[in-house]
Image (tube, rainbow, N blue to C red):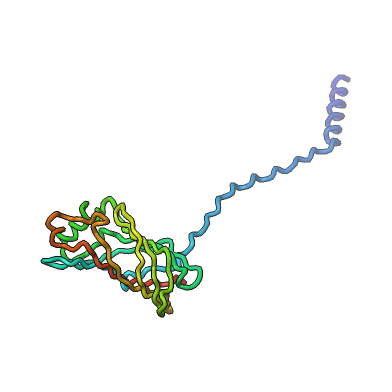
């Protein structure tokens, strides 16, 4: 009898368990993936300087040997143009260690601390601040600042600027007093060299498509 009652109770509880509705499990939502920061694409430069067709050279009169040289490395920076040529703005970074006068000993001296001091001041910086029509076709008065070493000075440079199918060309010339920028050199060199350096340039800017 005892065994019969045990079997009945066991059967009763089994039936009750089957009769109870199964609890529905709330599905677990997958965790949202982390949001990656959006990388803003860098704006493509408006122009690229064609170094192979551009030139930035200087000429200094001396009693024994006139000095003529150029810079072989230059880079455009921060160039903008919102309208015609009068809205052109930008910077030119000139690598002073790229100075070239066809005489290695003189080039090494020009990179030293009594001239360009290229180790401390690797770039001379030309900043185009204003472009104003000068009353003749393609001629503009360009206000620039020229920074060499830790000195900076403004110049107004008559410049021929021409739109071309590929971009812009600019040609001009101006005089710089090298002593203002502490480009003094040795004592004897100052005795035989003019303080004035004639700067001549031709820049070919190719528009990026």
**Which quadrant would residue 59 be assigned to in this image?**
bottom left
Residue 111 in sight in this render: no
Query: What residue lies at 85% left-to-right and 22% top-to-bottom?
Result: 3
Residue at the extreme top of the image, as rendered: 2
Q: Is residue 131 above or below residue 6?
A: below
Residue 85 in sight in this render: yes
**In front of the other: 116 or 16:** 116
Instruction: Please indicate whether residue 38 sits to the left or right of residue 5 in the image.
Output: left
Instruction: Please indicate whether residue 123 sits to the left or right of residue 107 in the image.
Output: right
**Which quadrant would residue 69 be assigned to in this image?**
bottom left
Residue 90 x, y percent position in the rendering: 42, 63
**In front of the other: 156 or 64:** 156
Query: What residue lies at 86% left-to-right and 32% top-to-bottom?
Result: 16
* Quadrant (top left, top right, bottom left, bottom right) of the N terminus: top right
Residue at the extreme front of the image, as rendered: 135
**Which quadrant would residue 205 be assigned to in this image?**
bottom left
Q: Is residue 63 above or below residue 167?
A: above
Query: What residue lies at 20% left-to-right and 53% top-to-bottom?
Result: 114
**In front of the other: 60 or 99:** 60
**In front of the other: 175 or 183:** 175
Q: Is residue 152 above or below residue 131?
A: above
């Amino acid at each position: 009898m005892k065994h019969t009652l045990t079997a009945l109770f066991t059967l009763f509880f089994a039936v009750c368990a089957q009769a109870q509705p199964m609890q529905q499990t709330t599905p677990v939502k997958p965790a949202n993936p982390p949001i990656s920061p959006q990388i803003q694409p860098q704006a493509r430069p408006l122009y690229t300087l064609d170094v192979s067709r551009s030139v930035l050279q200087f000429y200094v009169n001396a009693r024994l040997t006139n000095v003529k040289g150029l810079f072989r490395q230059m880079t455009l920076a921060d160039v903008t143009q919102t309208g015609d040529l009068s809205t052109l703005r930008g910077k030119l970074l000139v690598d002073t260690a790229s100075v070239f006068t066809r005489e290695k000993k003189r080039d090494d001296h020009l990179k030293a601390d009594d001239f360009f001091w290229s180790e401390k001041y690797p770039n001379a910086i030309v900043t185009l601040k204003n472009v104003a029509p000068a009353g003749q076709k393609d001629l503009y008065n360009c206000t620039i600042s020229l920074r060499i070493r830790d000195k900076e000075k403004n110049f107004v440079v008559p410049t021929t600027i021409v739109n071309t199918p590929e971009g812009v060309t600019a040609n001009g010339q101006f005089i710089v007093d090298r002593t203002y920028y502490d480009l003094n050199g040795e004592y004897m060199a100052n005795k035989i060299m003019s303080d004035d350096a004639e700067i001549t340039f031709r820049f070919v800017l190719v528009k990026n498509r």
